[in-house]
Image: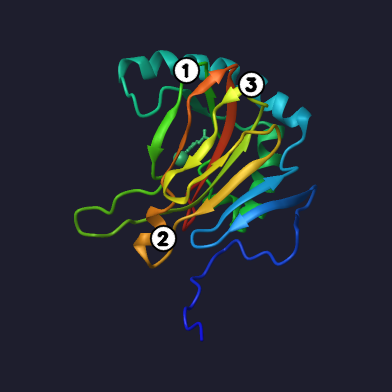
Amino acid sequence: MNTEVKEASIFDYKGNKIVTEDRDISIIARMEEPVIAVLGNVVSEEECDELIRISQDKVNRSKIGSQKTVSDIRTSSGAFLDSADVTARIEKRIAQIMNVPVENGEGLHILNYKQGQEYKAHYDYFKPKLDGTTPNPRISTLVVYLNDVEEGGLTYFPHMNLSITPQKGMAVYFEYFYSDPAINERTLHGGSPVTAGEKWAATMWVRRKQYR
Ligand SMILES: O=C(O)CCC(=O)C(=O)O
Ligand SMILES: [Fe+2]
């Protein structure tokens, strides 16, 4: 008899798709504990192009900033997006997919990796403070791929032996608020080096409580 009790997830979809206000998202693959799901049809080609277009300048500017604080954990450039029609529409859709209020999301964070750039393996959740508490912790992440990458740029989960190839308009979802810390630790992940072409992605990190 299996007496194991599965831990709670907010990604509790039973069917093969997620119906949002303006788009049906397909669940292409999923695993449990931790939930990691590969999603299709998350954003349209046009929306991908529009997000890249409006972040081009911002990302370039953030690069100058990031060169001051050299970090080899993340060699890509990133920037949070300002409010725009396309941003609001996509953030609303993503909140529905992630099953949280839109206010709990940190906002779309655009990442641009040029050839050779990467994001080394890391956790998206924060370390507890010295008193052991984490006031408004991150609970889940959605990484949306905004372009097809020629070579490399996979999202990899080394503890799960899992890699996801970026495909324009698709996304990977994962969550890390399990009571068993060992399950959260399995969400260690990174963006592997882009070996040809470049990579554009949009990340949404979600908090337990309202953030914005
Ligand atoms: O670029 C990727 O595939 C991963 C991005 C990521 O881990 C993040 O934005 O937190
Ligand atoms: Fe991450």
Q: Which amino acid does label 1 sit on?
A: Gly
Q: Earlier in the sequence, mark 3 or mark 2?
A: 3
Q: Which amino acid does label 3 sit on?
A: Glu
Residue 110 position (above or below residue 8): above
Separation of marks 3 and 2 at Cα, in angstroms? 32 Å
Separation of marks 3 and 1 at Cα, in angstroms? 12 Å
Closer-to-camera residue (155/66):
155
Residue that numbered label 1 is attached to: 116
The image position of residue 193, as x and y in percent, is 48, 25
Residue 150 numbered mark, or none = 3
Residue at figure coordinates x 35%, y 29% from the top left: 73
Question: From where the camera sits, is residue 193 visible?
Answer: yes
Circle 2 sits in a helix, a strand or a loop, which is it? helix
The image position of residue 88, as x and y in percent, is 67, 39
Residue 127 numbered mark, or none = none
Circle 1 sits in a helix, a strand or a loop, which is it? loop
